[in-house]
Image (spheres, rainbow, N blue to C red):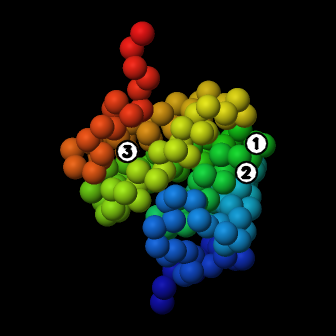
Amino acid sequence: GGRRSAWGLASLAGTGVGADVGGRGGADASAMAAEVRAKVLQLYQHNDPAVKQAADAALREFQETELAWRVARELLADGDTTVQFFGAQMLYSKVQQVAKGYQVMQGAVLKELVPALRTQLASAAVPQQCKQRLVLATAAVAVHLCAKDWPSAVADLLPPPG
């Protein structure tokens, strides 16, 4: 038989929500964000190695879903810096998967992520270590898209000199 998912409330079978990069996730993303948050805290704060291992496996499984794009953005708004960093790292990993060709995504859809990344980078509520991951994600999007879908990426992202 198949592997049993570690996710309860929002079964991963229903997370193939197409192109949810730009942020239209709704209640499913909010419910899943709460579950992911709990797993992140288990991974980093629980004393039992078996619980940590199970949380790690579940988070790795979730990161492969389309819903992970939206949930990662929700985690950036969390009050816990560990959860925020996990969200930033998950976004960076997702962008890297696309940039390296392991996932296919239309350039226009990926470009929709940039304004949200810039908003998070400007926020005082986002810790510096998270911002470093978001800068890497933004740069990876620009590099991936500059050849075809967004030729003005660098000029659009950097302020003019002077």
Q: Are marks 1 and 2 in contact (CB under 8 Å)?
A: yes
Q: Which residue is mark 2?
A: 41
Disc nearer the start of the sequence (1/2): 2
Q: Are marks 2 and 3 in contact (CB under 8 Å)?
A: no
Cα–Cα span, label 2 and label 3: 29 Å
Residue at 54% in and 38% down: 118
- Percent coordinates x, y for residue 28 in the rendering: 67, 72
Q: Nearer the viewer, mark 3 or mark 1?
A: 3
Left or right relative to 159: residue 116: right
Cα–Cα span, label 1 and label 2: 9 Å
Disc nearer the start of the sequence (2/3): 2
Determine crowd level at label 1: few under 14, some 14-19, many 20+ residues with C-alpha closer than 10 A: few
Q: Which residue is outermost to the top?
A: 162
The disc placed on residue 141 is 3
In this view of the protein, can residue 49 be seen by the observer?
no
The residue type indicated by label 2 comes to: Leu
Q: Nearer the viewer, mark 1 or mark 2?
A: 1
Q: Nearer the viewer, mark 2 or mark 3?
A: 3
- Percent coordinates x, y for residue 136 in the rendering: 44, 35
Determine crowd level at label 3: few under 14, some 14-19, many 20+ residues with C-alpha closer than 10 A: many
Q: Which residue is mark 1?
A: 80
